[in-house]
């Protein structure tokens, strides 16, 4: 009987964990994001701090209302939120436990949903609870930015990465500035394309929270509209976003001489292109010149050359395949040298440098 030594067993266990991690990302719960952010927004408001259930009923209906009650009650108790019921019609609820009993009501779920819509609480958030809420939300969003979490509804799909959605947002946001200034509302059903073409692949709320985490916007208000399926979020662009231009971090440089090209970090050369006329360098220079933006195959193919992107389907496929293979080989070289470079493929390519 064959046995594995301890080190090999640990290696296999580690690889198994990695594989499971890749294919089973942590599920991101929209209810938690909305409730935690709403609590933080209420803390910034004047007294009284009124939490209206009707304002956080995102994607809630008669089929899942009992689950929503259970989740909300559990979360409020978890962060020790002190509550008094404000709505005179709901005086029978003297504590969150009384509110939680609704999920066991013998009434129809339609009637329970109606009661929950009418409920509102005056809340008090003490400083230790406030810190825990903020830390929890930051932890979720950081994990989302790093690609470790997905919306529960996207587990079986292939959603856009945050870096891709951020690059599309930066491309589109100037249009909003011209129309509305730096303070405006975004609707998840109407404005999802600010993050990507396919709605099911975008993360509207999580992306806005991530942009706020990176100090590019400030979320002012969150509302639920459209039969509780449309998010309406008012944002203000920060100065950092208003003047932002996509460019690599200042400590990184792409330098070209008569025959070669180099990537430098501060004063150290960390990667060398043996030829500055190769497709590998030409394609990378195109991505570098369009840092953080999606670059389509046509632009890469024609960049820095007299070539014309083909119109015929077969020749176009061949050109795209050449670009993909060249960039794939380049990515492998970057990984081998443990460089913090990310090249995302999605109907084109997006290049960014990962910074701490």
Image (tube, rainbow, N blue to C red):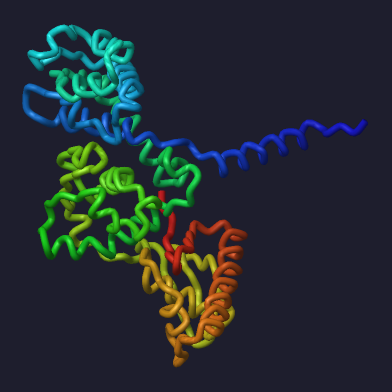
- Marker count (numbered): 0
- Quarter occupied by residue 111: top left
Could you tell me residue 339's position as x and y percent? 53, 59
In the displayed structure, would residue 58 be above or below residue 188?
above
- Decide which of 90, 327 is in the foreground and name it: 90
Quarter containing the N terminus: top right
- Quarter occupied by residue 92: top left
In the displayed structure, would residue 29 be above or below residue 336?
above
* Residue 214 visible in image: no
* Residue 328 visible in image: yes
Tell me which residue sits at (48%, 51%) in the image.
Answer: 158
70 on left or right of 188: right
Most extreme residue toward the bottom, as rendered? 306
240 on left or right of 262: left
Could you tell me residue 263's position as x and y percent? 48, 70
Tell me which residue sits at (48%, 48%) in the image.
Answer: 157
- Decide which of 268, 36 is in the foreground and name it: 36
Most extreme residue toward the right, as rendered? 1
Could you tell me residue 73's position as x and y percent? 29, 17
Could you tell me residue 334's position as x and y percent? 56, 63
34 on left or right of 182: right
Tell me which residue sits at (10%, 58%) in the image.
Answer: 181
In the displayed structure, would residue 266 be above or below residue 226?
below
- Quarter occupied by residue 271: bottom right
């Amino acid at each position: 009987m064959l046995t594995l030594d301890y080190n090999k067993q640990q290696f296999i266990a580690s690889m198994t964990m990695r594989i499971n991690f890749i294919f089973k990302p942590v599920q991101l719960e929209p209810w938690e994001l909305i409730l935690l952010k709403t609590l933080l927004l209420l803390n910034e408001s004047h007294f009284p701090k009124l939490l209206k259930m009707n304002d956080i009923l995102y994607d809630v209906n008669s089929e899942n209302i009992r689950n929503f009650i259970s989740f909300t009650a559990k979360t409020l108790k978890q962060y020790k939120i002190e509550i008094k019921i404000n709505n005179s019609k709901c005086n029978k609820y003297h504590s969150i436990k009384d509110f939680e009993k609704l999920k066991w009501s013998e009434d129809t779920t339609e009637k329970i949903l109606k009661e929950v819509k009418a409920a509102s609480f005056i809340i008090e958030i003490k400083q230790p609870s406030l810190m825990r809420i903020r830390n929890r939300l930051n932890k979720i969003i950081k994990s989302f930015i790093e690609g470790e979490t997905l919306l529960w509804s996207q587990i079986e799909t292939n959603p856009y990465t945050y870096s891709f959605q951020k690059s599309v947002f930066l491309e589109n946001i100037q249009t909003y500035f011209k129309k509305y200034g730096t303070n405006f509302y975004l609707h998840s059903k109407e404005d999802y394309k600010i993050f990507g073409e396919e709605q099911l692949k975008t993360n509207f709320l999580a992306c806005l929270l991530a942009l706020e985490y990176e100090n590019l916007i400030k979320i002012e208000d969150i509302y639920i509209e459209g039969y509780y399926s449309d998010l309406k979020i008012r944002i203000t662009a920060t100065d950092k976003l208003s003047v932002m231009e996509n460019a690599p971090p200042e400590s990184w440089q792409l330098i070209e001489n008569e025959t070669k090209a180099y990537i430098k970090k501060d004063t150290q050369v960390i990667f060398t292109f043996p030829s500055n006329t190769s497709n590998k360098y030409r394609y990378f220079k195109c991505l570098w010149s369009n840092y953080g933006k999606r670059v389509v195959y046509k632009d890469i193919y024609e960049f820095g050359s007299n070539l014309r992107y083909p119109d015929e389907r077969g020749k176009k496929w061949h050109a795209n395949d050449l670009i993909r293979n060249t960039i794939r080989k380049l990515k492998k070289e970057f990984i081998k040298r443990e460089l913090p470079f990310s090249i995302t493929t999605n109907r084109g390519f997006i290049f960014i440098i990962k910074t701490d």
